[in-house]
Image (cartoon, coloured by chain):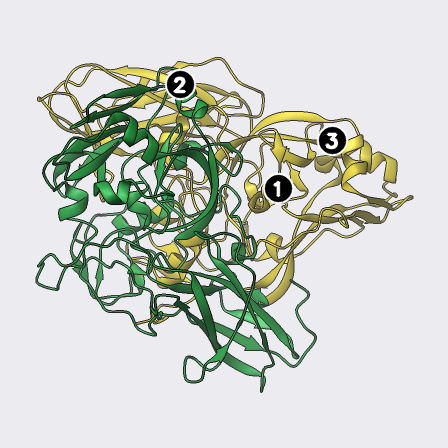
Chain colours: A yellow, B green
Amino acid sequence: MEIAGSAPASGLVDTAAITPEELGLAARNHGMPLEALRYPITPVGLHYLLIHYDIPAMDPASFRLEVGGRVERPLRLSLDDLRARPQVTLPVTMECAGNGRARFSPRWISQPWLTEAVGTGEWTGTPLAPLLREAGMLDGAADVVFTGADRGVEGGVTQDYQRALTPAEAMGDDVLLAHALNGAPLPPQHGFPLRLVVPGWYGMTNVKWLARIDVVDEPFAGFQHTSGYRRFAADGTPGEPVTRMDPRSLMVPPGIPDFMTRERFVGPGPCRLEGRAWSGWAPVVRVEVSVDGGHAWAEAELDPPIGPRAWRGWSFLWEPSATGRHELCSRATDAAGNVQPVTADWNLKGYANTSVERIAVSVGDGPAPAHP
Amino acid sequence: MEIAGSAPASGLVDTAAITPEELGLAARNHGMPLEALRYPITPVGLHYLLIHYDIPAMDPASFRLEVGGRVERPLRLSLDDLRARPQVTLPVTMECAGNGRARFSPRWISQPWLTEAVGTGEWTGTPLAPLLREAGMLDGAADVVFTGADRGVEGGVTQDYQRALTPAEAMGDDVLLAHALNGAPLPPQHGFPLRLVVPGWYGMTNVKWLARIDVVDEPFAGFQHTSGYRRFAADGTPGEPVTRMDPRSLMVPPGIPDFMTRERFVGPGPCRLEGRAWSGWAPVVRVEVSVDGGHAWAEAELDPPIGPRAWRGWSFLWEPSATGRHELCSRATDAAGNVQPVTADWNLKGYANTSVERIAVSVGDGPAPAHP
């Protein structure tokens, strides 16, 4: 039997059950298994992946990046041109704006993320700002529009994937046109041959398969700015745009898992908890851990930073008070004073649900599980 | 709100809705987006991934493969020892035995695959047979047991992941101990530093994070042979083991997709369909295409083989008879006479559902979508 599309293809659902459309997305996109938090730089294939349409077929030899619109000198750059420019390598933590969507109730039907839509890549490319200076933005530039080579239909609108930044945002020091990830050419699924990397912003702004950059003199009002990536109210009123990543901390689930439920089992005795935390607004300066489901909190120890735009490692020695079931949580605070909420504010389309993760762990009194 | 575990953690469900447990698995494991069928060798990160427990932390320096049990000369081999032996590189198509599970009704609660649980890797490693000859299997060897370093709880049983082959199967010409994928060391998620590759078999036999090989004198009756990977009847009676991959063909979805429904849109005029087909029993010798939902079938053209153990490319020129909605299918036949069924036989735990894939395509009369 084929799955019948009995559920609405878009809209809200008020049940924990996942629709066939959401399954279709979950089967092709994927999160980062949380045990991969152990790697400071996420290995290729473990970094989260969200592809709106299809991965397009790209020919690196004929590829040209077009820079045009309201500029003095339009540019047309090959991959060799881009690689001949100054290069920067930067570890950047990137998260999907919809991370946590499936933990809201009711829930918007879209990619049903739990908490795993994150990863940290070491991106190599040329800074965007000097390239925009070379092109020369004309007076009255309102936005810089980035167009990917991926095309599809969304909300009834046929479109190329497009996102924009203001000129000031686009001229940011660390905005890159990246052609490499973790020291190798971009994999197809991460935007080969070229993508935009905007450190600190949610993933939707980091346009993959980047084909065009256009300076425009009206604020950009494309689908991904007006129909997506805003904190819509329940009645559909567009709210504030989703931009930078709100603070979040995640934990390497300790012990060994149950295959189906993912519940964890640890042996008796001290257990070192570890994880990583990030914020797109400012560096993470504090991580707290709760071993009783969020009632009491204690300070975790922070690892040295691995870079200004990457997550921060943390650890905490847990000495379980008793055998039986425990619920472990962590939460992050950044230098701008943003604190990860125990329960994030609901919004219609399910963005930025940074509610603290809860990991169920059973502590046994028998021999400790051998792994890890 | 956290998702409540209201559905049973195992067992059958008779609804298209996906349970929270299935979503937890779908978020960490992932299929190959079908447009990646365009690559003869699947790029890392697009190959399907199914991890029963966690990706274990492995130290390549201290890693040793133990070969023991009923052998004359137990072996203890470092990675350098294994890499110093003769090396073979082989493109191998690998598919999860549960591929298609979520298209059965009722459906067993487990990893809810649709059709994407496949990929073709170029695996490099040393053949297993000479190594077993060196160890010298003693008379009366019944099975060769492969133990991974991944540990967890499944069906209430705490276990290391284990699968076995008969001595004859283990001595097969093309069985490899692989340390590299697509020319680079194995990524963590594919078994770093060492995995078993058994060409033609479903994925569960290709043990990742391979730690031990033991020759035993009784037929192996571990969890993954008795409780999993058999064609159980509805009443739970264990049926035949699932071993080699049944024939299947898949298609690169033509045109451009709708983000949510994944329905496809193509412009008017001829449309070249292409895909890949495989069987673990014998080479694919025929692929047929239906453009009317499986009523009439026509021959596809086969590409030259890329290897004896890899999928076979095919193509078909479709000239849509009318605008509107069409349903595209393909099916494979192998040299042993196995034909992919339009509707595969149901079995309790949802293995080997090779029912033909159906791709809904709307043909427009306007300008053709620009991609691909």
Q: Is residue B299 left or right of residue A301?
A: right
Kind of residue at disc 3: Pro
Q: What secondary structure is marked by label 1? A: loop
The residue identified by callout 2 is A314
Q: Mark yes or no: residue A157 visible.
A: yes
Residue plotted at (50% across, 26% down): A41
Q: Quick one: label 3 or label 1, which is nearer the N terminus?
A: 3
The residue identified by callout 3 is A127
- Between the C-alphas of marks 1 and 2, the distance is 27 Å
Tell whether label 1 touches label 3 (CB within 8 Å). Answer: no
Q: Position of residue B49 (x, y in %)?
A: 39, 44
The residue identified by callout 1 is A206
Crowdedness of circle 2 by 10 Å Cα count: few (<14), some, many (20+)?
Answer: many
Disc 3 and disc 2 on one polypeptide chain: yes
Residue plotted at (22% across, 40% down): B167
Q: A190 or A281: which is nearer to us?
A: A190
Q: Quadrant of the C terminus of chain A?
A: top left
Q: B177 or B154: which is nearer to us?
A: B177
- Between the C-alphas of marks 3 and 2, the distance is 30 Å
Q: What secondary structure is marked by label 2? A: strand
Question: Residue farthest to the right?
Answer: A72
